[in-house]
Amino acid sequence: MSPENCCQGVSVDFGNPVPGHLNSSGCRIGYAKGKGRGVYASRDLSAQSVVEISPVLLFAAKEYEEHGKHTVLDHYTFKWRDGRMALALGLGSLFNHSSAPNVSYTIDPATESIRYTTTRRIREGEELCIFYGHNLWFDPMDSEPVNATAEETDDGWGGLSQLDGDEEAEVFYEELKHLMDGNPDDRIPDEQLPFTRIKLLPDDEEEDELSAVHTEPAWAVDISDPKQTTTMLKWLKISGLETSSMSHLKRIRRTDDKMSILLTFASSSPDPPALPEGASLSAPYIVQAPRSAALTPLSLKHKSTFWPTVYAPRRKGEPEVWSRGKVKWACEAMREAVREARKASEEHGELPIASYVPVPYDAETREATQMLASHGAHDTRTSTSHPLRHSVLNVIRAVASYRASEGDSSAIASELAPPTPGLVDLDELATPSSSPAPPETRQNGSHYLLTSLTLFTTHEPCIMCSMALLHSRVKEIVYLMPMEKTGGCGSVTCVPKLEGVNHRYGVGVWRKGRRWMEETGIEVDEALDA
Ligand SMILES: C[S@@+](CC[C@H](N)C(=O)[O-])C[C@H]1O[C@@H](n2cnc3c(N)ncnc32)[C@H](O)[C@@H]1O
C-alpha cells in the first residue's frame, strides 16, 4: 500500500497502521520504511511555513537518569536548555532524522514548546525531517525521493512548472541573455540594467532649497588681529581639532567687521576647545556649519550664509556607467548567490539566504584590491544556534579574512571557525569559488575591508547587516528580494542614506527579483531579518 493511502481515523502504510492526524498545516503521519513512523506533507508546503508547534514534557535530570533513560523514552527525549530532559508532544516526536533536513526547529523556553518550520518548498508526499545532530544512536536511512505522478509529467506548460529550482534559476538567467550577449564594452543605459538603483542623495532641486541645508553646531573663534591668521591656521593643523569630516568647510570666514576661524564640530569637542597660550582671542562660540559640500551654485550661496562651504559640483555617489560585460558579471554573481541559497536550505537545512562577493569586474579594481577569489556564504543561524550568523556577516568575515591573510588558507579557516568545533562546515560557511591565488598575489593584512567591492545577496539585508556593510566600506550591494518588514537598505530604512553616516554604499534592487526568488523556492518569511 502506498504512503498516500490515508483514511480519516487511521492511515495504513506498508501494512503498518498509523493514526490519522488533524494537523491543518499540511502534515500527516506515515510509515517511513526502515525508520518507523514519520511525518509527511499532505499537500505542497512553501518554504518557511510553520508546520507544527509542539508543547514539551520536561523531566528533572535526576528523574530521567534514574527512570526515563532506561525506557523507550530514550529514543525521543533531548536535552532542554537548563539541563532537564524534554519530550515533544504532538507531532514533534515523530519527525525522523535526515542529514539534509527540510525542517528546522526553534525551542521556545517561555512557552515550553518547539516550533517546526520548513526550510524549503516541500512537495506533497515528501517526508519532513529534522537534523538530530552528529552523534546518532541508530544507523540512519535517507528519505526516499517523491515519485512523479502521471499528471506531473505533462503539465501543459511544456514541463516548465516541473523544472527544479536549479533549472528555473537557469530560465531566469536565460531571460537576461539579451543583455549579456554582444560587445562587452557596449554601454548599457541605466533603465536597461537588471536592477534599479536607490537614490542616496537629494535631487539637485531639493539641494537648492534653503530648508534642505543640514547643519550642525561647530566651534569658532574671532581673530581681532589679521596677522594672527597664519599662526592660528598652523596651530589648528597640529591641535588635533581638525577632522576629515570638516573637509567641505573653509577654515576662515571674513565679514565686513571681523575674521573668524572654524575650530571643530561640537560633536568632536563638546566643551569649548582650549586655545593656544598667549593668543589674545575671544572665547570660542558656537556657529551652525553645513554638513556637506555644495552641489549647485544656489546651494553654495545658501550654505555659505551659515559658514563658507566648498563647491563640489560632481555629485558624490553619482551612478557609474555599466558596460554589457559588467552586466553579465552581475548576472553571474547573482546566479551564484541564488545557488548558494538553495544549497543552504536543501543540503544543510539552513535558511535559503546567501551572499556573494565576486572578483571585481575591471582590471584596475582587481589590481588595487588584490581580490583574486570570489567568496560566497550562506546563513548559518540554524546549525550554529547563533543569532548573528546572517549570510552578509558571514561573507564580510570571509572576505575580510581572505584580504587580511598573507595567503595562508588555514588562517582563513581558523578565523571562520565557529566557537564550538563541529557546528559549522567551514567549507560551507565561505567557499572561495575559484582556486586560491598564489601566496605572492594574496593580500598583506592591510586591506581587510570590502572597499571597492560589490556584494550580491538574495534578500535585502536587515538593519544590523546594513550597518555592518557600512563599516565594511563595501562599494555597493545588489539584492533580489526587498524585505518590507525588516530591510535596512530601502524598506524599513536605508542605512547608507541616513544623515551623519560616514560612508555611503550604492544599493541596487533586482528588477525581477521577487519572481526569481519565488520560482527557485528561496523565499523566506517577510518578517525575518535577512
Ligand atoms: C524521535 S523518534 C522518530 C519517530 C520514530 N520513527 C517513531 O516511529 O516513533 C527517533 C527514532 O526514529 C528512528 N529514526 C529516526 N530517523 C531515522 C533515520 N533517518 N533512519 C533510521 N531510523 C530513524 C530511530 O529509531 C530513532 O530512535
Image (tube, rainbow, N blue to C red):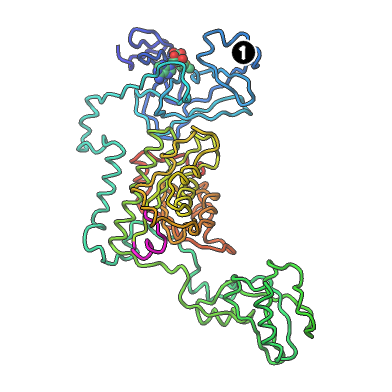
Q: Position of residue 400 (x, y in %)?
A: 48, 52
- In the image, residue 517 above or below residue 272: above
Q: Which residue is mark 1?
A: 64
Q: Is residue 279 left or right of residue 75?
A: right
Q: Position of residue 409 (x, y in %)?
A: 43, 46
Identify the image quadrant of residue 60: top right
Identify which residue is drawn at 69% across, 85% down.
231
Identify the image quadrant of residue 467: bottom right
137 and 489: which is toward the camera:
137
Identify which residue is drawn at 26% across, 50% down.
175
Total numbered labels? 1
Q: Position of residue 273 (x, y in %)?
A: 75, 73
254 and 303: which is toward the camera:
254
Q: Is residue 347 magenta?
A: no
Tell me which image quadrant ligand 1 sits in. Answer: top left
430 and 318: which is toward the camera:
430
- In the image, residue 126 above or below residue 64: below
Q: Is residue 274 in view from this perspective?
A: yes
Q: Which residues are magenta?
A: 362-372
Q: Residues within 10 Å of mark 1 (few under 14, many from 20)?
A: some
